[in-house]
Amino acid sequence: MYFRDFDKETKKKNLELPSYTASRELNTVGGMAANNSGGEKNLKYGKTARYVEGLEVVLSDGQVHTLVSLEGEVLQKKLQEQSFEGELYRKVAALVGTPAHAKVIEKNKPQVEKNSSGYAVWDIGDGKTKLNLARLMVGAQGTLGIITKIHFKLVHPKPYASMAVIFVKNLSQLGELVPEVLKYQPDSFESYDDHTFSIAMKYLPELATQMKSGLLSLGISFLPELWMALTGGIPKLVLIVEFRGDTQAEALQKAQKLAGEVAHNKDHVSVRVAKTEAQARKYWAVRRESFNLLRKKVRGKRTAPFIDDFVVPPHTLPEFLPKLQKVMAEYPSLTYTIAGHVGDGNFHIIPLVDPNDPTIRTTIDELSHKVYDLVVQYHGSISGEHNDGLIRTPYVEKMFGPEMYGLFMEVKKIFDPQNIFNPGKKVGTTFSDALAKLDLPPQPSVKTQQGK
Ligand SMILES: Cc1cc2nc3c(=O)[nH]c(=O)nc-3n(C[C@H](O)[C@H](O)[C@H](O)COP(=O)(O)OP(=O)(O)OC[C@H]3O[C@@H](n4cnc5c(N)ncnc54)[C@H](O)[C@@H]3O)c2cc1C
């Protein structure tokens, strides 16, 4: 079922699945559960896993099974059951319950709030008092079985929004700003960089078309930002902080309070408040559409999502972002924008590449290693919401270490001994396999950074 159809039905009852994505018009709820997707409301509402109460799945025995979180006596009964399901529960319980494994899991579990990489063995219970195989399936990217029904918990959306927009001139200010903003518990805390800002200004007519807005009125609405860019330079980063409420006044009060606190720091940042959802639309449009505009405008190039979804702890951003920009600057031929969910430390970089460039495979390999080495150094995740896929799977071991990766391979073997569900995703793909799978014209084999 498409999310867009699901959303229409739940909205009739004033309910919402708040983990919807930027791809909400295209994606299915099955894909959202399989990827453990998240989106602009993640900061307040978390990812899809939080809303899945139970699943109906087809497992490797070809039969339909119902998976929910089991505890206490019910779990004990299940563990004694002489059936395919009983066997599955026993094997997973043994895997996570073995003290040595429990230590490996505790030591190597993600240290960031937002993660879709690996199998969520740290979040399914200890196998003795609790075991939640539905949670294991969520985010497993269809590698353990096929989800055929989902029992979702929903929330009541708050109808009114206001936004504080913070223009940051110096990235070093982020260290102070991020915790200051998070203290106000916004519904969304997103960002885009100077490249994105420039592209939006350059392609204003196209942005207007995308927004179904008149060019003149959009141009006028952006005059303060244009004036700011002309007089003080383009901000390094724009932070958009949305607050929602049951009344407009409630939402506005929160945005104004934050803006007031941030504004005292005028030397480094400037702040605006978009009082209503309508006034905030242009900022959301830049955040959501600039990359698409760029993609459509640049001829002969295509998107290459290989470092598109990493996460680092938000407090490390002032140190991490300049290092990342330095790495990216080593590849001047790549056109890219950096936008993301700054509140979660989750960033999307999807460079445009020339598919006929003979060096592109080498660049993808080199850059992936450099970026993911940096992410791992800051105890981050290689994927916050898009999941591992074929291209990122070789880096799963880099992120979690060999012992945890060994447990992931065990999980896969328990559920899918014949390797029939999405083979090569999550486990079992080498660096050279991944490069060979890139959707690019064939080229002689590339020696990868890891030599395999
Ligand atoms: C422009 C753009 C923006 C995006 N923005 C976001 C975002 O904001 N947040 C985010 O989290 N993601 C985002 N994504 C990534 C992706 O669109 C989402 O994660 C989406 O929720 C995946 O759903 P889908 O239906 O497109 O799944 P697909 O891409 O079709 O499938 C995803 C994976 O899940 C498996 N799968 C699908 N259905 C099932 C099922 N029923 N049972 C078992 N396995 C299944 C597939 O085999 C595949 O491995 C974006 C992608 C694009 C192109």
Image (cartoon, rainbow, N blue to C red):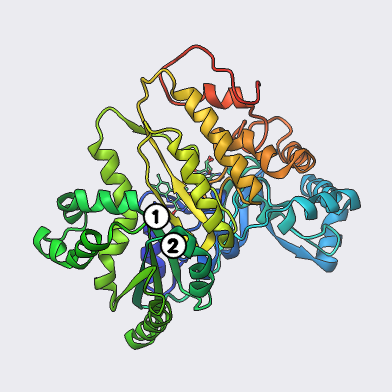
Q: Residue at x 61, y 36 (%)?
A: 393
Q: Quadrant of residue 59?
A: top right
Where residue 182 sits: x, y (%)? 52, 72
Nearest to the observer: residue 283 or residue 405: 283
On screen, 305 above or below 256? above
Identify the mark at residue 40; answer none if there is no mark.
Answer: 2
Q: Quadrant of residue 408?
A: top right
Q: Is residue 93 visible?
A: no
Where residue 399 sits: x, y (%)? 67, 43
Return the residue at label 1. 22
Q: Residue at x 64, y 27 (%)?
A: 430
Q: How many marks?
A: 2
On screen, 351 above or below 347? above
Nearest to the observer: residue 262 or residue 127: 262
For label 2, being within 8 Å of ligand 1 is answered yes
On screen, 197 above or below 424? below
Q: Residues within 10 Å of mark 1 (few under 14, many from 20)?
A: few
Cα–Cα span, label 1 and label 2: 8 Å
